[in-house]
Image: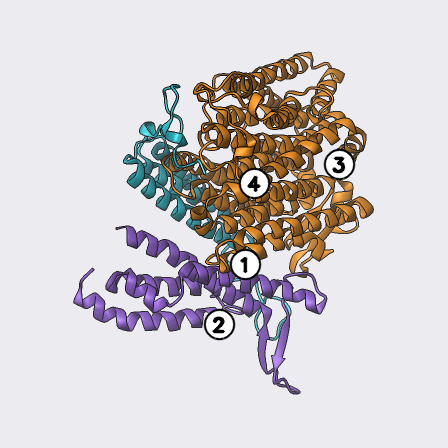
Chain colours: A purple, B orange, C cyan
Amino acid sequence: MNSLILNAATRLLVALMLLFSVYMLLRGHNEPGGGFIGGLIAAIGFALYAMAHGTAAARRALRFDPAAISVVGLGIALLAGLSAALAGDALFTGQWWFAGAIDGEKGLPISTVLLFDIGVYLVVVGAALTIALALEDET
Amino acid sequence: MSWLLSLPIVLPFAMAILAFLFRANGRSGRWLSIGGSVLLLAAAVGLMIAVLQRGVIAAQMGGWPAPFGITLVADLLSAVMVVITAIIGLAVAIYALADIDARREALGYHVLFQVLLAGVSGAFLTGDLFNLYVWFEVMLIASFGLLVLGGDKEQLDGGIKYVALNLVSTAMFLSGIGMLYGLTGTLNMADLHLAVRDVENTGLLTVIAVLFIVAFGVKAAVFPLFFWLPASYHTPPVAISAIFAGLLTKVGVYALIRMFTMVFTQDIGYTHGLLLAIAVLTMITGVLGAAAQNEFRKILSFHIVSQIGYMVLGLALYTPLALVGAVFYLVHHIIVKANLFLVSGIAKRLTGSFNLAAVGGLYKSSPLLAVLFLVPAFSLAGFPPLSGFWAKFLLVKASLDIGAYLVAGTALLVGILTVFSMTKIWAEVFWKPHPEDVAPALRLVERGNLTALLVPVTGLAVMTVMIGFFPEPFIGFAERAAAQLLDPTGYVTAVLGASP
Amino acid sequence: METVLAPLVGILVAASVYLMLARNLIRFLFGLVLLSNAANLTIFIAGGLTPAMPPLVPEGLARPAEVVANALPQALVLTAIVIGFGLLAFALVLVYRGYRVLGTLDSDAMRFAEPDEIAPDTSRSEGRVP
């Protein structure tokens, strides 16, 4: 699509959407949000970019093959789930570390749950874009 | 425990990821595929040993206690299904060395194949109804991909019908899950077993049961919901047809057996009576459909339908002996049917066609292949002393025991008609001379390919003969599995802890 | 609220059956979309509709402060929507590919896998011989 308005707006919107998708991903554990919804927002951002500048440009902007992104995401999610076994828990049990925790201060919580969510995020971005770009290519 | 139960699911997924990452690297995918199947077999055997020693085992994913979290459970039936999945997976992975071309490998055949195995194992091992739905979908999406991989005309045509009908069945399954949850408040199968006893509105429960019969009936390809199967199974490459023929419909049968022994037992007269009618009609239509076909794989496809009827029959009669027969039949059928599809692929490769009119002469030129065809073919028809004889014998005996003479007669008649189909293939493909007077011999196939083609076929044929000659341990095993199905107390205790 | 939504499920299913009976595959797909939405809605209604807070535990408490909604049906519906979305996207791409390759959207005209004639069909064997 060759539209000046869309082209100009896309530059701003895509950056905003990607930022917002990461925000959604990170707030997901305790509040509404999460990897799936974040991934969809990011995928919409790239789909918009593909609409404005063509799929070739979108693939360049993505840098990696979308299918590869989703498979890597699946691998990350799988590893996050399996890592519970290292701590001796049942598989897919969330593991938590509190980085820099001192008395009375919780520190920065880091968990395999977040890792799993990042995996989900990548799976969703990859899968949605694989389909969207393939359909866009055909027309 | 947790590891033992999740390895058969995690391993194929890991292999799928590796196969994808190395997909650019030419032939590494196929070795990953074979290696993955070997590891899966090892994991499945480990699981089987554990189940044999300790009875039903269960694990809670994420450490959430039973009715709330996702539970993986293995009783004898689940364990044997996972083992057989791994065996067929290995056989097909070896066969695929010679059968899947480089183009399909580059398109991701090995990735989809491993995802399919993961989905099938997951469906066998899960103890949660919604999770079963998820594994069904994993399996379906992989099978969709495999079915249309390469994108030939016939493949797309068959694929559209396959996808359409399976998606409708998925929606039915989902509605059934929703209503069952609304009625009982739980989706954990063990918990459901207890919860359905307290349901007052048993009429609604029966309606839901029928919804599940339709949903699983489409997956299992029973009458009158089987039309997607003969429309699609003969279109992809043989290796893909074989794994579909061996495993996919049987997941539907497994789900039927699981649900209708564990949950829907409140109105056996109606639900199992319905299943009995379905089973008989499935047997008859399948075998008659096969008699009308003149294409090797289409005949075999219709026979899948007819054989599914026998397994559902075992469930529908719902006596201990009939369930023994159903379990035995399930295992025997997977081996035999996958093997027949693999043989059809070799015959096609030698003679150039699946069309019975255009081929011939294989008995003279490759007697080894003729023997390898006869073993599974006669086993399918139920000749002693092959595995199919014992499977049919158990089912017929079970129906005679409860005085269902008509059913027993139908089962025997369908057996005879199966012989007719098999002799038709035998006469056309092997006995009559080739119409163009060529003598296709096995040695014409390139050496490496020949090994890849013959090893799985021979291995599966040997298994059929073994089960046939030494049926006692297998029947004994099926008896124990059926006893667990009829009395799920052990299952419930393993999942929920001490039984209330 | 259930009494309003339950007939809605019925209407959705009726509409989807009507659409799915059409020979045109695009109509069939639309019917499928409606059917999967009806199934999702069924789960949602079956979980019980209550005006309640989201099931989140506030900071510092061990359990939710007030009555919360049942989270399970929502999780199930979300999963079902995601899976349904994936499958329908696949089906759409498949039908589109089918249209490009087979040249038709009429399910009656799709007889490539099951041709009517029984005559020997030599064209199929091409390209499969190694």
Q: Amino acid at mark 1?
A: Leu
Residue A109 in the figure: left or right of residue A36:
right
**Whole-percent x, y for residue B268 in the image:** 67, 27
Please name the residue that numbered disc 3 is placed on: B481
Q: Chain of mark 1?
A: B
Q: Residues within 10 Å of mark 3 (few under 14, many from 20)?
A: many
Q: Earlier in the sequence, mark 3 or mark 1?
A: 1
**Labels 2 and 1 share a subunit:** no
Q: Nearer the viewer, mark 2 or mark 1?
A: 1
**Labels 2 and 4 share a subunit:** no
Q: Chain of mark 4?
A: B
Q: Amino acid at mark 4?
A: Arg
How far apart marks 2 and 4 lie (CA) works out to 56 Å
Please name the residue that numbered disc 2 is placed on: A26
Please name the residue that numbered disc 4 is placed on: B447
**Whole-percent x, y for residue B60 in the image:** 68, 55
Report whether residue B324 is seen: no
Q: Foreground: C18 or C46?
A: C18
Q: Amino acid at mark 3?
A: Ala
Q: Earlier in the sequence, mark 4 or mark 3?
A: 4
Q: Chain of mark 3?
A: B
Residue A66 in the figure: left or right of residue B92:
left
How far apart marks 2 and 1 lie (CA) works out to 28 Å
Q: Residue at x 38, y 65 (%)?
A: A42
